Amino acid sequence: MHTEEKELSCAECATLNCHKHESRYPKFCLTSNVEASMLDTSLACYQEEGMDRTIALAAAEIEGKYYGTLTRVEEILAFARRIGARKIGIASCVGLVNESQIFAEILKINGFDVFMAICKVGSRDKTEIGLQETQKIRPNTFEPMCNPILQAKYANKAQTDLNVIMGLCVGHDSLFIKYAKAPITYLVVKDRVLGHNPIAALHLTKTYYKKLLTPREL
Ligand code: SF4
């Protein structure tokens, strides 16, 4: 029987030798087997003057200077300053609007202009894009759709220099990222069950979230 060769990647690596050079690269390693042109063109993005270089240097400088000492809120302030951003777009989930407004205040206190659009902007019912009433959280009631594309269009129109995602849903964030023009970073990653701390599920796979390690129909 023909079996397709399994594609191995960093997901199966047990050495992480690219990180510390204290071990060996595995046979399938993405570092030791990299195509020279792929590596070179990626390096060229950082070496040429432009936003890629500015972002990469800012991120690395903040990591080095403030390692383990700044909250992500503070890191975003430091990052925005270093990339020369003046106007910050906030793409907020309606469920996090209070926190987003506090963040907006912090940005303003620090001299930034702020433009925020929440996910329900446009206020159209979910059925308008083909969702069935039975698929709503509360069927047969007005349930506004999330409109991350409109959030992005608003951010683009406001000419934001950096956009910050505040807890957009899985998938809605994908659309915001697809349509927004300015660079994007996250302040909050939504997890409605774990207090917006999704990594907790991974930390608990030996105990309470063991179920994650078995296949499930979701
Ligand atoms: S690049 Fe190579 S050494 Fe690094 S994690 Fe991936 S497979 Fe492991």
Image: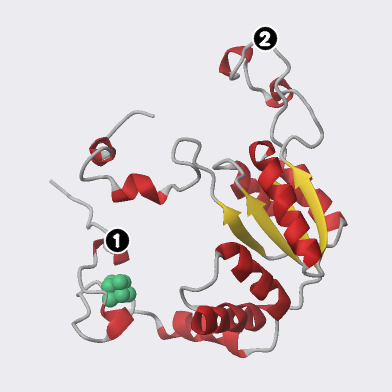
Marks 1/2: CA–CA distance: 44 Å
Looking at the picture, which amino acid does disc 1 mark? Ala
Q: Amino acid at mark 2?
A: Asn
User: Left or right: 152 with respect to 173?
Assistant: right
Residue at the spot 76% in from the left edge and 55% down from the top edge: 104
Which quadrant does the C terminus fall into? top left
Q: How is the image coloured?
A: secondary structure
Residue denoted by label 2: 140
Please name whichever residue, 9 or 205, is drawn nearer the observer in this view of the structure.
Answer: 205
Residue holding disc 1 = 11
Secondary structure type for disc 1 = helix
Q: Residue at x 70, y 27 (%)?
A: 129
Question: Where in the image, quadrant-wise, is ligand 1 located?
Answer: bottom left
Which residue is depicted at the point 30% across and 66% down? 10
Outermost residue toward the left in this view: 1
Q: Is residue 79 left or right of residue 128?
A: left
Foreground pick, 192 / 146: 192
| Image location of residue 61, percent across then percent down | 56, 84
**5 to 132, vertically: above or below:** below
Q: In the displayed structure, would residue 126 be above or below residue 69?
A: above
Mark sitting on residue 28? none
